[in-house]
Image (tube, grey):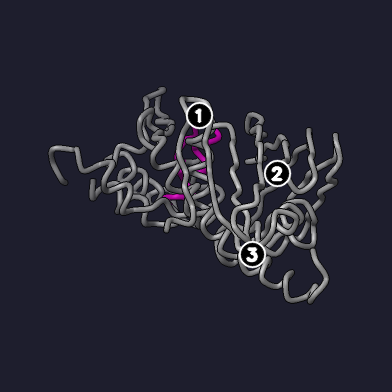
Amino acid sequence: MTPLTLKTEGDLYIVVTRHFAAPPEAVYRAHTEPSLLQQWLLGPDGWNMPVCISEPKPHGKIRFEWSNGKGGGFFLTGEYLELEPYRRLVHVERMHLPDPTPDNHVESRFEPHGTGTLMTMRMTLPDSQTRKQMLATGMEHGMEISYARLENVLSAAPTRS
Amino acid sequence: MDATFAALADPTRRAILARLASGEATVMELADPFEISQPAISRHLKVLEKAGLISRRIEGSKHPCRLAKDGLDNIDEFLAMLRQALTKNYDRLDQVLANMKTNTGDKSL
């Protein structure tokens, strides 16, 4: 079983699915309550989220600040747009690198699946310039790109240096 | 291909790429935030240029650098990084959810 699927939908969206062994209410809460978000929404090892503002109501504010504990950090701001408790969340977010990236529109659905939850998250595929910026920043922050995958992508190259 | 791996393996070179993601910069501007000499920065830039990750243009005596148009601009690389970040996050979320279950005992969530 593949726990995570990630694929593009046309040129505009990325669709991610993941199964969790907990009911939709718990998964929804873990996506909206600051004390829970701070435990898992951290990216690479060694990072934490000292500031987590999440106001799960229409127009509610989102602000996440990450730190590597060594003076490095960046933050994200956003707003909740639509909330159907325990079933569906729509929010918009942007990274500050330090200039804000274009808005990423994210819809998350939490559906009962057996005794657990199937989460489907649909987000905006960043444009070329933003991808470049996020890749470079991500690599600096320790989110290494998968070399195995890169090897596949580049294996079409006729010569090796 | 191996040149790309080698170029990305070094933390200073990744930091240089991150800096260039926000715009063009000269060797002097790049050397400034790092505690290393301009010749050392120049050596890093040569590696990055050879790997096709940056390009340089000539403007008088300056040679400003920028990210190469096709260097890091690849959807697959971006998705690979996103997949890795999400995998880490959701593995941690599994643990958070398991703890929530334990903490609430018999009460339904």
**Residue A87 position within the rendered picture, expressed as x and y whole percent measured from the top left:** 72, 44
Q: Earlier in the sequence, mark 1 or mark 3?
A: 3
Q: Which residue occupies the foreground of this view, B1 or A12?
A: A12
Q: CA distance from mark 1 to mark 3?
A: 28 Å
The C terminus of chain B: image quadrant: bottom right
Q: How many marks?
A: 3
Q: Residue at x 79, y 62 (%)?
A: A35
Q: Earlier in the sequence, mark 2 or mark 3?
A: 3
Q: Which residue occupies the foreground of this view, B39 or A65?
A: A65
Residue A37 in view (yes/no): no
Q: Which mark is residue A76?
A: 2
**Residue B84 position within the rendered picture, expressed as x and y whole percent measured from the top left:** 47, 54
**Residue A31 position within the rendered picture, expressed as x and y whole percent measured from the top left:** 72, 52
Q: Quadrant of residue A22?
A: bottom right
Q: Could you tell me the amino acid type at mark 2?
A: Leu
Residue A84 in view (yes/no): yes
Q: Could you tell me the amino acid type at mark 3?
A: Lys
**Residue A156 position within the rendered picture, expressed as x and y whole percent measured from the top left:** 19, 38
Residue marked by disc 3: A70
Segment tinted magenta in the rendering: B13-27
Above or below, comparing residue B10 to residue A92 in the picture: below
Residue marked by disc 1: A129
Is A149 positioned to the left or the right of A49 in the image? Answer: left
